[in-house]
Image (cartoon, helix red, strand yellow):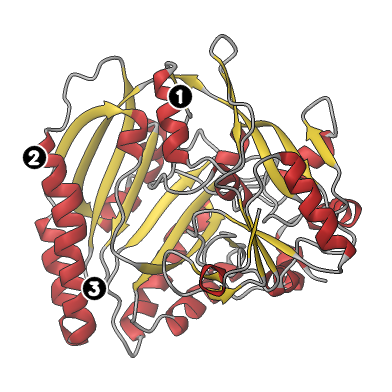
Amino acid sequence: MVDTAPLSARWSNWAGNQRGSATAILRPGSPTDVAEAVRSAAAAGGRIRVIGSGHSFTAVALADDRRMELSELETLVSVDVANRLVTVPAGMTLHALNGLLARNGLALPNLGDIDAQTVAGAISTGTHGTGAGYGCLSTFVEAITLVTGSGEVLHCSADEHPDILTAARVSLGALGVLVEVTLRCVDAFVLHAHERPAELADVLGDLPALIAGHDHIEFYWFPYTTRVQVKTNDRVPTNDRPLSHWRGWLDDDFLANTVFAGACRLGRTVPALAPRISAVSVRALTERQYTGRSDRVFCTPRRVRFVEMEYGLPREALPEALAALQRIVDGLPFKVLFPVEVRFTAADDIWLSHGYGRDNAYIAVHQYVGMPYEPYFRAFEEVATGLGGRPHWGKLHYRDAASLAAAYPRFADFQAIRDRLDPNRVFSNPHLTHVLGA
């Protein structure tokens, strides 16, 4: 289960902005292996961090001692079609889960725009999609199996340890190792996607109707322009307008990845061209409509590397936040090469969820790898914090535990559960000490 080879101990996340070396690599094959590894680390005064697929931009998964990988963890896969429940290993990727569900006539009710994350990683950081009627993916969690800091294996559900379930559905991996997750699904469904260019002012002016009128809506603002690309996804009964293989490759692979990557490289080399590149990019986006299997419409390939900050804001604060963001972009001493993404979620009751107790609008700011970003991100964070914003746990931010405690009404309750399950902080690292406290 342990591999101490120096090269394998090196790790970096998808964006390449987080790198580190572990003292040992743990690859458990069963929950019993996980429990033994935790007890061993605790006895030695050591620490364990579990990694998923590396799609968090923060140092949340960075191990300064032992690193645990769940790719070889085997637990029973159970699909209860009648009750629309699925139980899977926590290290399964969303891509594999979506395939499993589709083969059984089921689907997750909502997804984000990529499916490379593990189930544990996605729910632990509050990964979300968009849609006014849907919370983050953690709201679909019905039960978990968790290994605590003492090596105890706990099954948590509405009937067993419900307080732990509430806390662990978004936990940053601070409460223990998730080894198994039960998710509530829905019958498989088809989405009709409609993508179209528009003016930002028009979209903001019509936003309440757009949010209410569609199952899922998001838009991308292109810096240095007044233009956005709007995407709506709505459930329809039949897949009667599938996207041709050629059009899918052209739009989602060639243009969105290959051509966009070339444009970003050009903008990084000649920053003065960034406004022109942004204007050309938004003009190149044409309207299209198509239908498809839900997960294939929700999720698209992302190969152009970037770093990202995302804030969940009270929905009514969105216009003010976007106006301030436009001023920030215009005043930066460098250029921004990526569009700004705006999404929407429903309120939930998960203690560390960005959507706890309120409907959210999310603003995600990005920057191409190799380009300066910290002044941009810090300036936006100052605005977002002042508007009651909560940072996405998997995206870059600069908040500390004291600041975050004021943003989350149940922060102290989460800390109490953490003290019960991991009093010796076996599952901590410097990043968690910063955002959750010692």
Query: Label 1: how many residues lie within 10 Å, few (<14), some (14-19) or many (20+)?
Result: many
* Label 2, label 1: how far apart the Cα atoms are: 26 Å
Residue 258 position, x and y percent, is 16, 61
Which residue is drawn at the image coordinates 77% and 66% (left, top)? Answer: 47
Residue lying at the far top in this picture: please name it: 82
Q: Mark 1 or mark 2, which is nearer the start of the sequence? A: 1
Secondary structure found at label 3: loop
Secondary structure found at label 2: helix
Can residue 344 be seen?
Answer: yes
**Viewer-nearest residue: 72 or 222:** 72
Give the side of residue 97 with respect to residue 334, left or right: right
Residue bearing mark 2: 246
Which residue is drawn at the image coordinates 41% and 68% (left, top)? Answer: 15
- Are circles 2 and 1 on residues that touch, CB within 8 Å? no
Residue 25 position, x and y percent, is 63, 62
Amino acid, disc 3: Tyr
Give the side of residue 380 with respect to residue 68, left or right: left
Can residue 274 be seen?
Answer: no
Q: Mark 1 or mark 3, which is nearer the start of the sequence? A: 1
Q: Mark 3 or mark 2, which is nearer the start of the sequence? A: 3
Which residue is drawn at the image coordinates 77% and 72% (left, top)? Answer: 402
Amino acid, disc 1: Leu
Q: Which mark is residue 224?
A: 3
**Viewer-nearest residue: 219 or 293:** 293
* Label 3, label 1: how far apart the Cα atoms are: 42 Å
Amino acid, disc 2: Trp
Residue bearing mark 1: 101
Residue lying at the far bottom in this picture: please name it: 333
Q: Is 193 situated above or below 406?
A: above
Residue 75 position, x and y percent, is 64, 32
Query: Label 2: how many residues lie within 10 Å, few (<14), some (14-19) or many (20+)?
Result: few
* Label 2, label 3: how far apart the Cα atoms are: 31 Å
